[in-house]
Structure formats: structure tokens, C-alpha cells
Amino acid sequence: MEGSTLSRFSISYSNFSPCERSQSQPAKSPLSNGLLSYRLIDSGKRCNVSLKTFSLAKRTKDYDFDSSRHRAHDKTQKLNLEVSPHRAVSAVRLMRIELGGAFADLLNEKGKGSGKNEMAYIERTLGFRTRDLDDRDLRLVTEIVGGTIRWKRYLDHLITSLCHGERAFRSMEPLLVQILRIGCYEIDKLGIPPYAAVDECVRIAKVALRPGAGNMVNGILRKLALLKDKNFLPLPKVEGDDRSQARALAILYSHPVWMVRRWTKSLGQAEAVRLMMWNNSEPSFSLRANKKKGYTRADLATQLNMLKVPHETSLHLDDFVRLKTGMQVVIQAGLLKEGLCSVQDESAGLIVSVVDPQPGDTIIDCCAAPGGKTLFMASCLGGQGMVFAIDINKGRLRILEETAKLHEVDDVVTTFHSDFRIFAKEKPLKSDKVLLDAPCSGLGVLSKH
């Protein structure tokens, strides 16, 4: 049984009870690509389980999947109306992101349209279902998941400080860690009344894990609320040498230490702090109306007014509008799914305005995927001309092809899966314009990722 086959068990970790350790210590197999080998108690067979899968769990236990499956099945099909659905969904999404490699933005984009599938994840992970999410719940899920990811280092420091150290924190079940992160974020960053956050997080820990887990959540979150009220949170002081100050700032503003040191060195500490605060603030987004479908910015603005989504027109680009909130509403309304508009940063749009695509132009986009600029340029051609989209990543190029069909510009987009450095030598193309927006560190758009 391969590790990939067992990936779903990482999501359902809380449903499986640890059994006695195998007599033989888990050993790495040369065929398992660094996976740990575990014995199935009921059959005596061995299976490969990724270290990443149990990164926060007890990594050297054997798991009786057969008997645990029966216990998990007994808990299924239960509807729990006492657990707040947005916290349950947030906890499971965070599990999927951290242990399963999911992407927060893709989970958000599925939104309300995949409610049944989402609730199936809840049931497999927690052992019960909650009521379906309403629009307010979805907004809270997006806020909590995004905020918890942004402030993860800071939140983990608080939890570690309040639970008797690093060792105790590392021994916690993955689900318990996510519940504590959510509670800390709600109390310290969202301003949720402590009594509500504590009560709800304790309830989900008791129902999904065990009474003892609820007691631990209760103790840690109550202590956090008390210290916050007294303005006495256990935070590091920015003092000592440059390295010590960078470590403290990395915790306070939840950024990697290397990044803090680089920015402090190049920008100065005050400007580096401003940049980190901006990165962790709620980002704004831009939408581009797809004029190839005859959908103008005025049409988009009218639709946003009907949906009661606050927005403003771009100061620089004719097809763009800016949003601070309401992206979930746009997603649920189907504007992206229908190809009427797309999420695109104005900085990307400005690059296209420099290229200035005109009908009849032949344009080469050298590092095209996932294709935002490619599609914008294609929409400007009016069905006349061609954009050759080249990229080394086959999966992202496939996304570009699918989106080109959705936006009805696939007739003027031709894709090539290749490293452009090789492609330029083997398949020389003639063109009127070339766009080379080379891959970079991505630090400039860190707030949106």
C-alpha cells in the first residue's frame, strides 16, 4: 500500500487510535523514497507512510487501520449542530493545507459550490457533520484560514509559551494544533469575544478528539485571553545582536528569519517592519473584465453593484476594478467560472499595457503559465493574430489551455511545453513582440500567497 494511497488517512488522523509499537523499529526502505515503513496489525503487512503525513503526530506508532475504521464508521453520519461549522471547516482546511499539500486559494475558490464534498472531508476528519455553511460562514472561513496561515509562526510561539514548551507542542495531534491556532487567532487578531472563541474551540476539541483535549484548549485559550487583557502576552523582546533581533522580529511579525535579516539589512528595521505588517494585512484584489466575451468594465461594475460588493475602478487600466472584500461573493455568483472576468493584479495588467498588443500581432510569451498576461494579450487581439505561450511547467500550461477555452481566446493562443532556453534554439519563431516576465522570488506578492 503506497504512501499516496494513505494520504487520506492523514486527514482522518484523529479517527485512528495508536496501537502497541511494533517489535521492530520502523526502517527506511530503499524503494520507498524516504518513507517510513509501518506494520498493519490486523494483517501483518507493511505500508509506507510519509513523514510529512504525520509531521506533527507520533511518528513511530503502528496504527490498526482495520479496527479503527470500524470505530470511525460508528461516528459517521452524525449531524452535530453544536459545533460552529466555520471553525470545523477552518480546522479541516488547515489540516489539508499543512498535511495534504492543498492550496488555500483553490479551496476558497471552490467555496459554496462544493459544500457536499467539503462536508465529506469534515465527516472523515472529525467523525461528524455540521450544518451547511452560509455566506457569513464562508467569509469567516476565508478570513480564519488566511489569517492563521499568515500568522502561523506568531501563533505557534504563543501556544508553545502557554503549553509548557516546545516538546509539549510538538507532541500534540495535528487537529489539536489547528484548533488552538484558530482560537489564538480569533482572540488575539480577530477580536472575537474570548468567551465565544474559548467555548467553541473547547467544544470541537472534545467532540472531535477527547475530553482531555478540550480541557487543554480551555486552559491555553483562557490563559491567552487573560494575558492579552492585561497586555502581558509572552512575546520576545527585540534586543541583542542582529541575529537575535531578527529572530524576535520573525516571531512578532510571522516571517522567516532569513527574510527579516535580508530586509532589515537592505531597508532598515523600521521599513522592514512596515513591509511585514503590510504583508500580513488583508490584501486587495483586482478583477479584469473579459472584453473578448463582450463583457466590459461597466458591465462588471453593474454586476458588482447588484451583488453589493464594494469596489472602485482602476486608476491605470480600463478593464480593471479593485476589490478589498467580497471575493467569495464574486466566486459564488459564477463570474469567474463563466469566464466573464478573471482575478488579475494590476501590476500584471500594466506589463501587458507596455507590450501594447494590437490586432494582427504575433506575440511570444516566454514564461507564460499560469497565463494571466497571456489571456489578457489574447483578448486584446480581437481574434486576429497569435500568442505563442511557452512554459516549462506542463501542469500549469494545461490550466492556461483550459482557461483560454473558457475565455474564448483559444483560437489565438498556441501553447508549447518547453524550457524557453532550449525552445529558442530548436524552434525559432518570428514575432512582432516578445514578453519575458522571468520567474522571480515572488516576495512582491507575498501578501496574496
Image (cartoon, rainbow, N blue to C red):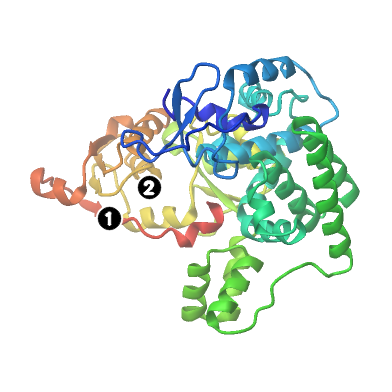
Q: What residue is shown with label 1?
A: 436
Q: Amino acid at mark 2?
A: Lys
The residue lying at 76 percent from left, 68 percent from top is: 234
Q: Position of residue 158 (x, y in %)?
A: 72, 60
Q: Work out whether residue 154 can be spotted.
A: yes
Which badge, 2 or 1, is on the more N-terminal residue? 2
Q: Is residue 153 above or below residue 77?
A: below
Disc 2 + disc 1, Cβ < 8 Å: no
Relative to 389, 192 lies left or right: right
Frontmost residue, 2 versus 416: 2
Q: Is residue 220 above or below residue 261?
A: above
For disc 1, the neighbor class at 10 Å (few under 14, some 14 to 19, many from 20) is few
Q: Is residue 24 above or below residue 376?
A: above
Q: Residue furthest front?
A: 23
Relative to 441, 336 lies left or right: right
Q: Position of residue 404 (x, y in %)?
A: 37, 33
Q: Amino acid at mark 1?
A: Leu
The residue lying at 85 percent from left, 47 percent from top is: 218
